[in-house]
Image (cartoon, grey):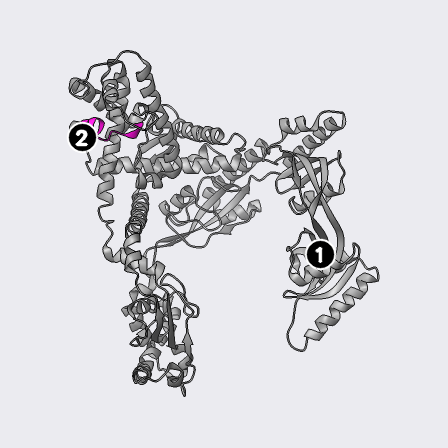
Amino acid sequence: MARKSTKNRCISADSRLYLKNYFELFSHRSIEGASLAMALMTQIRENLTTLFAVLAVFFIILIVFDWGMDLTGTSGRGAASGDVLGLINGREVSYKEFSDRVRREVEGLRQRDPNNEIGEETERQLRSQVWSAIVDETLLEQEIERLGITVTDQEIIDVVKGPNPPEFLTARFRDSSGTFHREDFLQAIAAPENKKAMVEVENIVRQQVKRQKLQSLLLATSQVSENEVRQRFIDRNVTMEAEYVLFDPNRMIQDSVVTLTDEDVRKFYESHPEEFKIRSARRLKYVLFSQMPSKEDSAGVRSEMERFLNQAKSGMDFLELAKTNSEIPVSEAFFKHGELSREKENPVFSARKGQIVGPIQDYDGFHLIKITDERAGKDEFVKASHILLRLISGPDSSKTIQKARDLLRRTRAGEDFAKLARENSEDFGSGVQGGELGWTGKGGWVKEFEQAASKARVGEIVGPVRTQFGWHIINVTGRDKREVKIVDLAMRVKSSSQTVDVAFQKSSDFAYLAQEEGFEKSAEVGGYQVRETPDFTKNSMVPGIGVNDAVSAFAFKNDLGEVSEPMTITGGQAVFKVSSIVEEGVRPFEEVKGISRPLAMKEAKLRKLRDQVDSFHKTLSTGVTFQDAVKGLTNVAAQQTPPFKAPDFPVGIGRDPAFIGMSLNLSAGELSKPFEGLRGYYVMKMISKTTFDSSKFNAERSSLRNDISQEKKNRVVSEWIAGLRAKADIEDHREKFYR
């Protein structure tokens, strides 16, 4: 039996509060007329709708910035009627609740952009977003209840009657100048005809205050210190240059001069457990049953396009035909060369005004295109093909040039250019297309190629032309300044219900057999390809699958060898098997012995280098330059960074916290002590450093503090939500309702 809705209990309590405090809370004289009551109710409902829409898609952002109140989304929770789509710590999510919210999201998208086609993939994304929002909302409410966060009657009174009532209540009581008419507001909320509205208001305020209290608890640790603000300013404004020497142990000391026993390696392993920590991870095997459009689906769309073509040939107005049937917005626009897909380009620009070309199939589906107008443009476009031979250094370079000259001779003698390109071109992208590069305007090719192509006549083959990519034989096949206006009737190829049903039936049959007879055996008998993911951690992206809460939940809630029911992923239905389980901890020594040895070797080499590094530093301390100090040292060179800031990766250094940290602690002209970085020992001298601008810092202090504060809040909330999700018992059964 479904659990009783928490929200329903809140409404009941709020109703009692309203009756209890009616004369206290709303003691002002009533005003006549129902207009204000209706306006207030409308305002409330409008705000509910807006809040729901925001919450459904941007819940994390919402609770950080506004901790807004979801109301409509919780209606119907735990309803006894309807099928259970999921469970969140025991709280039932009905199919009706879920589908209603998805429907509202779809309607919202259509209202915001009537021309936006909402296809299967968009709906799939919306379902994922709505499910994620419901999970987060539920966990939020459960956490509020667990912590015992309550709101007193007086707190609600203080919010509603206080100096700053909620904006959604006061909006209707502001004039064009923004002035708030408080007396009118107080009269309206006290009116008996507004009683029903005010019960809703009380519930809204109660939920808001609860969430504000949780917010305060959660973000209490996200204070920003003055040092953090100062450091952020330095990171953004202080530029440094330094000279340095790196003592790289792997370059300066051969392995053969270091004695390293197995016991030494083990001691390193035992003293550095942080180097070998592993997180809990899973690996899955799976079989995918594709729901991508079949040949029959594609043939059906082509047949439909042929029907439209025949209608147009029989005299039906093509523009009206396109407006009625096209699945992409129809607009008459001029196109230049290169602005259409490769599949459309040649047929469209080969046709003349009034012609209809197609059906043409490209990545976007099938197209019937009518050329309605043409004009001369300002820009000239060139169409060309080429054969590319990559540059080779050394004695074989002359052979490459000779081969290019030979290919030029053969093409000019009449051999098929496309055939020679497919056989010889080392530009594999165009090579499979017979060397075809399509139409390109000025600046579309590298300088040398463009100059040669621009001088050639149509039909002329030129070369060999050298560029940074190699030697080119160029065939200029067209020149044109035309721009054409088109009407595009487009239809996307979608999976038919039959295609979807077949995939679902196959996946269901396979899941049953895999659970009974074994996963690999059933796949072999059925002739299905078994794929396997790499290891992945909880609540992370599943490699090859993407972000999929249901798949991740299955992986981490089941034992080794467990087989799933069919689950919806991008591309179709999949059946999974837990193929590997890695528990959190420190990897066993025998497992990491191979990687422990080079780490232990590096540590031993660093110990051997220390005396040499200290001696080098002592020499520098006497005033000797870096260049002079490195004379006589092997595999050591004085180097200098380009100008860099703390968040940068200095060229030649990369991301090395020790190097950046030391840079920040040095003044201009100051020499560092030897310090260990990721690659070895460094000795550094600061050449120049931007001085700290106190006046600029004071001017930016407030905005910097706000930036850091918001980043902390975002991080805290994100980690908090992730923590709740990790501990939650979540069952997602959407795959039973959506194919």
Eyeballing the image, is 79 above or below 619? above
> Can residue 4 be seen at all in this image of the molecule?
no
Q: Which residues are magenta?
A: 156-168
- Residue 148 lies in quadrant: top left
Q: Which mark is residue 426?
A: none
| Residue carrying label 1 | 435
Residue 592 falls inside the magenta stretch: no
Q: Is residue 23 left or right of residue 556?
A: left
- Determine whether the residue tagged by mark 2 lies in a helix, strand or loop: helix
Q: Residue at x 62, y 43 (%)?
A: 363
Give x and y (percent) for residue 36.
31, 17
Eyeballing the image, is 183 above or below 417? above
Eyeballing the image, is 39 above or below 493? above
Q: 418 and 257: which one is in front?
A: 418
View extreme (bottom): residue: 632
Give x and y (percent) for residue 261.
34, 78
